[in-house]
Image (cartoon, rainbow, N blue to C red):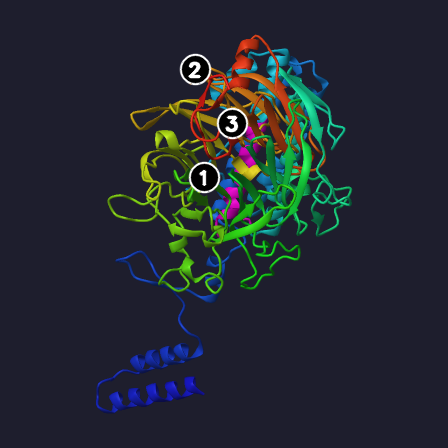
Amino acid sequence: MQLIQDLAIKIIYTLFFLEKGLMKKNVIFTALLFSFVLDAGEPNIIQPSAPGNDSNRIDASKAIQIADTSFTQDDVVFLEQMIVHHQQALTMSSMAPERTNSQDILDLAGRIEVSQDDEISFMREWLIERDIQSSSHHGHHMKMKGMATPAELERLASSQGVDFDRMFLTLMILHHEGAIDMVATLKDQPGSAYDPILYDFVSDLVNDQGVEIERMNGFLTGLSTDPRASLQSGLYTAESAISNLDLIASLKKPAGFFDPDNILEEDISNEEDDEDEVKTVEERSRNSRSPMLSFSNTDMAFRDNIMVAGSYHGFNIYELSTSGNPELITSVICPGGQGDVSIVGDLLIMSVEQTRGRVDCGLQGAGSEPTPERFRGIRIFDISDLTKPQQVGLVQTCRGSHTHSVVSVDTNDEKIIVYNSGTSSIRDQEEMDSCYEAIPGDTRTALFRIDVIEIPVKNPAASRIVKSPTVFADPETGALGGLWTGGDHGDDTQDTSRTEECHDITVFPSANLAAGACSGNGILFDISDPYNPKRLDVVTDTGFAYWHSATFNNDGTKVIFTDEWGGGGRPRCRAWDPLTWGADAIYDIVDGKLIFQSHYKMPAPQKETENCVAHNGSIVPVQGRDIFVQAWYQGGVSLIDFTDSKNPIEIGYFDRGPISDEKLLTGGYWSVYYYEGFIYATEIVRGLDVFKLLPSEYLSIDEIKSAQEAVPAIGPKRLFNPQQQIPMTWSTR
């Protein structure tokens, strides 16, 4: 109706103008009337031009053509580049028959030739069907990752036998990884891979090449002569390999700290797997639900002849003997994870981070809604009676407590100062309003901070946060996030988390130093004023994904930082993984600055189902040497000599085979610590192991004896807390 009314008005105006003599020709009237009718029939469709140029009027069919979203320019560029990418794989595969006698490599090369030749044909046909001619476009977003250089191809062509096999597998794995990365980049672009045929193709490509990578990693691992490379899997029946260490005790988890119906804590799948469908380890390990209660073993602390082993489910107290065989005294059930522990006198401090933790240590969880029953932060127990520990204090924190560090105990033993590091989500404002200060709904105020906690020794119930220093702030602008903002460091580097938290802060009180492993940075702090830690230096590492822990050498002149790539939930010791990823970084401390010296990573290749990255360790106090014992999750234990900071070497190890060959299950060693002549190791799933040092070409009997005789230079003579380092002395006890 409105269109008709508008048309009538226009006609009336036209007749008026004609009557006044303003239009004398019938042609004008006819043209105007036609235009009115045309305008009334359908709206204009306009396609603007570049600034300064007239817009174009187009019809509906043209508009539909322009708006066709069945494919994008990124799709085209991807396929054009993937054709070239596949052609290089064919080139490398064609070299195999004349350069290897390995039937596995020949079969692999043959499969690659057949599959990728077929895929090239598909990609070309897809482009032809859409009338796309070969172009020289190199899309802004697309890069051909994983391509071997001309020099690498030349070296491959000139190699023979095992040398060819090793180089061929390494290059082809990187090549396949590059193709998977290219697919991920494509899918990140809006509207790309929208075409169902193309989407199915790239999805199959990712899965097929992922399976091929796993197969090639198996072949490459098999070329290693290291006995750790091909150990048989199993829970308690796995094969093991050991060097310059003696395994003297292995204890399974105590009763109440494992589910007899699900000892491995395997996730429950949400969907049925098609037994006939080939899937990667990652695909078989996802789309699952974890049990509410976790029983993972975590960190340890020592006092006198007592060891406390933390767990997501609580903690266990063991009595240590001169033979090294621990005896369980008491188990304490108090779920909530993380379970990292420290001991100060008769007080035990435990970190709790998970949202299921309760004030009353209940097993039923705390639900999803805000509640005063939920507990996340620092628990304090009285362990004066080792047979009946009692919870005597709580400190609620905004992000829970992932780890904590005992900074100092005053001279009168009146208060303990603790640094708390929370890495989890920020609590709901309704549950803890102080996390948001004066800005309702704003979570930023709880980030970029650590907590300084005071624990009154005589009244732990009065423990509280006294300060939350903004240790990552920009000193010039005051911006809270003044350090690494997240992302990668350029081509072929990993994504690194934004520096908004410290995972571990290791304090060295006698030197007024602390080393923080803080997401995307390693930080050296001055803690002469423990309430106000000040940054002395900040470093980054292009190979690090998540700065996890820090350990000083005995005189506080060096720091080892570790990279927990993947949070301990992914493999990073595969034969083709760079030795700078999931590794250690060793720094000398010179005039308050961190000076990079070298990387170290365990040298033995591991399987796809082994979550192998750097984790917790401690100094072995050999006089005149810098020796470090370290956990690698399912990569086992390494004994590392870093006396020469630029050339660290492995001088001992222990490793078991993976828990499973079919599925990646989180397991292996959480922490490995030296204490009074023995090395104690918490195994996440399997239990607790105890080792002792053996003489070797790397370590003499006298040096081992010096480690046994070492005692803390200050404070209690028989004490070890994970994030607190006390210099050792070799005076006779």
Q: Position of residue 465 (x, y in %)?
A: 41, 51
Q: Position of residue 396 (x, y in %)?
A: 48, 54
Disc with the residue nearer the chain's start (2 vs 3): 3
Where is the N terminus found, in terms of image quarters?
A: bottom left
Does 652 appear above or below 281?
above
Q: Quadrant of residue 163?
A: top right
Name the kind of residue labelled 3 in the image. Ser
- Determine whether the residue tagged by mark 3 lies in a helix, strand or loop: strand
- Determine whether the residue tagged by mark 1 lies in a helix, strand or loop: strand
Q: Which residue was labeled with disc 1?
A: 406
Residue depth check, mark 3 versus mark 1: number of the one nearer the observer: 1
The reply to whether the C-beta atoms of the residues labelled 2 and 1 are less than 8 Å apart is: no
Name the kind of residue labelled 2 in the image. Asp
Report the Cα–Cα distance between label 3 and label 1.
16 Å
Question: Exactly how many numbered labels are in the figure?
Answer: 3
Q: Which residue was labeled with disc 2?
A: 644
Q: Position of residue 90 (x, y in %)?
A: 60, 26
Q: Is residue 178 magenta?
A: yes
Q: Position of residue 385 (x, y in %)?
A: 61, 43
Report the Cα–Cα distance between label 2 and label 1.
30 Å
> As drawn, is 725 to the left or to the right of 283?
left
Disc with the residue nearer the chain's start (3 vs 1): 1
Report the Cα–Cα distance between label 2 and label 3.
17 Å
Q: Main secondary structure of the magenta part?
A: helix
Q: Which residues are magenta?
A: 173-193
Disc with the residue nearer the chain's start (2 vs 1): 1
Q: Is residue 183 magenta?
A: yes
Q: Which residue was labeled with disc 3?
A: 618
